[in-house]
Image (cartoon, helix red, strand yellow):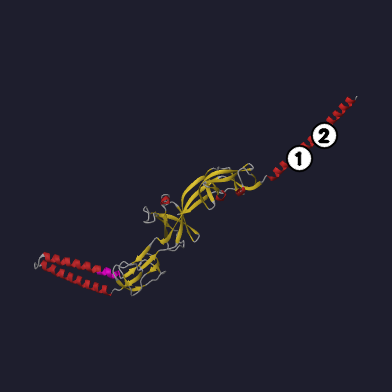
């Protein structure tokens, strides 16, 4: 009987221990489940979603322009000079004076030349009289034919000398050969005008042109149909290519290109101008804002939206200007380029799109020469 009671007691203790173990195990599992739930909740709470703006890419045209510089000048100019060293008697115009073709602008001293003309006229008249007298004597058989021929030669020589002195006298009255405005005056009355020295300069402001110095790589892309935009003090004018020099300027390696300016443009001679040439045009290219490009060493990349994740994409860029750049590889039309918020992203970051920005068309590129 005692053994039976002992066995019952042992069985009860075993059952009690089993119950206690089950209760402890249940509580442990509950606590582990709660801890796992808390961890998942914490992980969910710590995931950062980045707001971004995107632009769906499309193709557009791209024009390449180059800027070069030069000075405006008149297409028609005249430099007043004298053939001989002479004293200036009068200067009839000043800088800024309008002149017409044929108008006398400078007169030189003519007293000595007038005396030369009078002397030449006298010599010529005497030669003619002597020739006529000898010709009559020859007709009567008084002299030989050779003496008459010699007299005739003296007449022609005197005539040539007279014409030369008359021409010299006429050159004491220096005239304008074009309609225009006096741009420079380098002599005053009473001064000596040296032979060949520029005394006055006259320009015709109605037809202006600019000589621009263009690099070798671009001059081959320019012809008389090339579009030229001329900028003076921020104002744009449309020009046309008139002449292209086949020879580079000594010392610079640049090629002079003469561009005609529009009539009545108001551009004055000597004004410095900027000329922009369109040297190439591309179609169906992808153009993006240059500020979204990330530079890491020699690599270039951008972020594109791949679903709700940011994807770091390597690209290659070409020409660019004014905040735009051509993409030659890495992107294609339809890609969702991240244009704002990309500086804090990383590859695979979760994003939410706030704004879809429309792409721009017909961008151009311009670099200075």
Depicted 305 relative to depicted 69: above or below: above
The answer to whether residue 169 is magenta is: yes
Q: Secondary structure at mark 1?
A: helix
The answer to whether residue 201 is magenta is: no
Residue 3 in picture, x, y percent from top left: 88, 25
Residue 345 in picture, x, y percent from top left: 61, 47
Q: In this figure, which residue is indicated by the disc labeled 2? A: 20
Query: Which of the two residues, 134 or 280, is positioned nearer the viewer here?
Result: 280
Residue at 35% x, 65% y: name it: 79
Residue 285 in picture, x, y percent from top left: 52, 45
Mark 1 or 2, nearer chain start: 2
Q: Quadrant of residue 20?
A: top right
Q: Is residue 28 visible?
A: yes
Quarter of the figure with the N terminus: top right
The total of numbered circles placed on residues is: 2
Query: Which of the two residues, 135 or 63, is positioned nearer the viewer here?
Result: 63
- First to last magenta residue range: 165-171
Farthest-out residue, front: 2
Q: In this figure, which residue is indicated by the disc labeled 1? A: 34
Residue 159, numbered circle: none
Q: Quadrant of residue 15?
A: top right
Residue 201 in picture, x, y percent from top left: 37, 66
Q: CA distance from mark 1 to mark 2?
A: 21 Å
Quarter of the figure with the C terminus: bottom left
Main secondary structure of the magenta stretch: helix
**Label 2 Cα crowd, 10 Å radius (few <14 / some 14-19 / many 20+):** few
Q: Is residue 177 visible?
A: no
Farthest-out residue, right: 1
Position of 91 compared to 297: left or right? left
């Amino acid at each position: 009987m005692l053994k039976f009671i002992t066995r019952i007691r042992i069985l009860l203790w075993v059952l009690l221990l089993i119950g206690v173990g089950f209760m402890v195990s249940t509580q442990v599992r509950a606590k582990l489940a709660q801890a796992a739930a808390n961890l998942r909740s914490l992980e969910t709470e710590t995931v950062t979603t980045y707001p971004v703006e995107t632009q769906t890419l499309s193709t557009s045209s791209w024009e390449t322009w180059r800027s070069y510089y030069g000075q405006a000048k008149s297409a028609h100019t005249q430099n007043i000079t004298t053939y001989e060293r002479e004293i200036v008697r009068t200067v009839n115009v000043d800088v800024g004076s309008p002149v017409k073709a044929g108008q006398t602008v400078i007169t030189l001293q003519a007293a000595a030349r007038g005396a030369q003309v009078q002397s030449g006229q006298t010599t010529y008249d005497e030669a003619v009289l002597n020739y006529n007298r000898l010709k009559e004597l020859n007709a009567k058989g008084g002299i030989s034919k050779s003496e008459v021929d010699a007299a005739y030669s003296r007449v022609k020589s005197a005539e040539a000398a007279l014409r030369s002195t008359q021409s010299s006298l006429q050159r004491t009255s220096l005239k304008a050969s074009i309609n225009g405005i006096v741009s420079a005056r380098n002599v005053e009355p009473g001064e000596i005008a040296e032979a060949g020295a520029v005394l006055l300069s006259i320009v015709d402001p109605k037809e202006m042109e600019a000589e621009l110095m263009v690099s070798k790589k671009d001059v081959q892309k320019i012809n008389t149909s090339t579009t030229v935009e001329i900028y003076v003090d921020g104002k744009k004018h449309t020009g046309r290519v008139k002449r292209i020099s086949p020879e580079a300027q000594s010392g610079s390696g640049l090629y002079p290109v003469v561009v005609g300016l529009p009539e009545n443009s108001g551009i004055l001679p000597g004004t410095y101008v900027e000329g922009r040439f369109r040297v190439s045009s591309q179609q169906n290219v992808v153009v993006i804002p240059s500020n979204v490009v990330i530079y890491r060493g020699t690599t270039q990349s951008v972020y594109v939206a791949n679903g709700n994740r940011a994807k770091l994409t390597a690209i290659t860029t070409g020409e660019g200007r004014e905040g735009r750049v051509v993409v030659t590889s890495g992107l294609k039309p339809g890609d969702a380029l991240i244009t704002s918020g990309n500086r804090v992203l990383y590859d695979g970051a979760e994003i939410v799109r706030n704004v879809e920005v429309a792409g721009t068309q017909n961008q151009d590129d311009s670099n200075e020469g």
